[in-house]
Amino acid sequence: MSFTTYETNANNFSEVTESDKQPLVTNNLGRDADELELVYLDGYFGEIKEAGGIADTETGRININSDRTIRTEQVEATDTFTVGAELWFHAGGSGAAGKLVDADPGSGTRVSVGIITEEEGTGGAQTSVTFRPYVQVQASITAIATLQAEPRLLVVEVASDYGTAAVAVAGLAEGDKIIGVKSNCNVMNTAGTIQLLDGAAAAITDAMQQAADKEVAYAATIDKTYSTLPASGATLLAGGTDETLTRCTVVIEYIPA
C-alpha cells in the first residue's frame, strides 16, 4: 500500500513562534522557574514558554501576548477578586513563585498586569482568576519608535551684528536633541564662521565657515554630549576674523523633547 502526501499549504508556511510577543529574559529569581509559571523579569510579565522552565541565572522566553485571556491558580487565595477590577502581580523571589493579587501590595517588586474577567471561589478563599492582560511592548520596538520620531526644523536669521558674544536661539527647549545644522552665507566677508553652542557655552557643532556670499556649510560634527539641550537652551556664536560681518541663515534640525 502506498500513501500520497499532501502539503498543508502551497509554501509550507507555519508560524513557529511569535518572537515579538515572546521576549528573551534572564531568570534572576535565585531559583529555577517552572514552565508556564507567571513571572516578572526584565520588565516583562508573562508565563514561561521554555520546556522544563528557566534555570536560575539562565535565559529563556516568556509569553507577553495581550490578545487573549489567561486563567491561572497562581493567586493569593486570601484576596478578593472582582470582575472589572485591576489585577496586580506581586513577584516572588528565591523562596516561592509570585502571585496575582487584588491590589497594589505597596512594597516589593510588583506590576499592574490586566483586568479581571472571571474569578472562582469566594472572597478570602479564591481558587483561580481569569484576566485580560495589558499590552506590553518590547524594548527594541520602543527604541525603533523613538528613532522614528518626526524631526523639526528651526530657521534663524543672523541679519545683524552678533559681535563676539553668543546669542540665545528662541524656539528650542530643554530636552530637544540637535541632529543637524547648516548655514547659508548671505554676504561676502573675509573669514567669518557660525557655531551652535548650548546655553552653557559647550560646543554642539564645529564652527561653520561663512566667508563667501551664497556659501552653504554643514556642521561636520555634532557632539552627542551636548546635543540634547539643557534648560538654558542653545546659542549661536559668530566667530572667525570677521565675526561682526557674519550674515547668514541657519537651519537647525532637531527632535523635540
Image: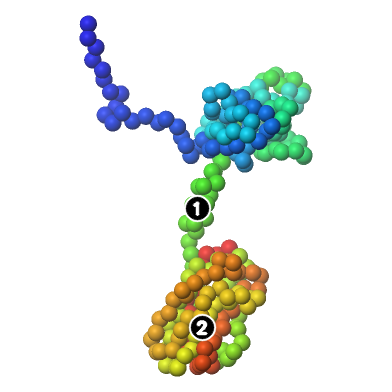
Residue appearing at x 51%, y 77% in the figure: 206
Q: Which mark is residue 77?
A: none
130 and 51: which is toward the camera? 51
- Residue 233: give x, y in percent of width and height: 62, 73
Marks 1 and 2 close (CB-CB < 8 Å) = no
User: Residue tagged by mark 2?
Assistant: 194
- Specify whether residue 123 is in view: no
Amino acid type at image mark 1: Ala
Q: Which mark is residue 145?
A: 1
Amino acid type at image mark 2: Ile
139 and 32: which is toward the camera? 32
- Specify whether residue 122 is in view: yes
Residue positioned most to the top: 1
In the image, residue 122 above or below residue 115: above
Give the side of residue 146 with respect to residue 186, left or right: right
200 and 255: which is toward the camera? 200
In the image, residue 126 above or below residue 134: above
Question: Alpha carbon of mark 1 to alpha carbon of mark 2: how far?
Answer: 33 Å
Q: Nearer the viewer, mark 1 or mark 2?
A: 2
Q: Residues within 10 Å of mark 1 (few under 14, many from 20)?
A: few
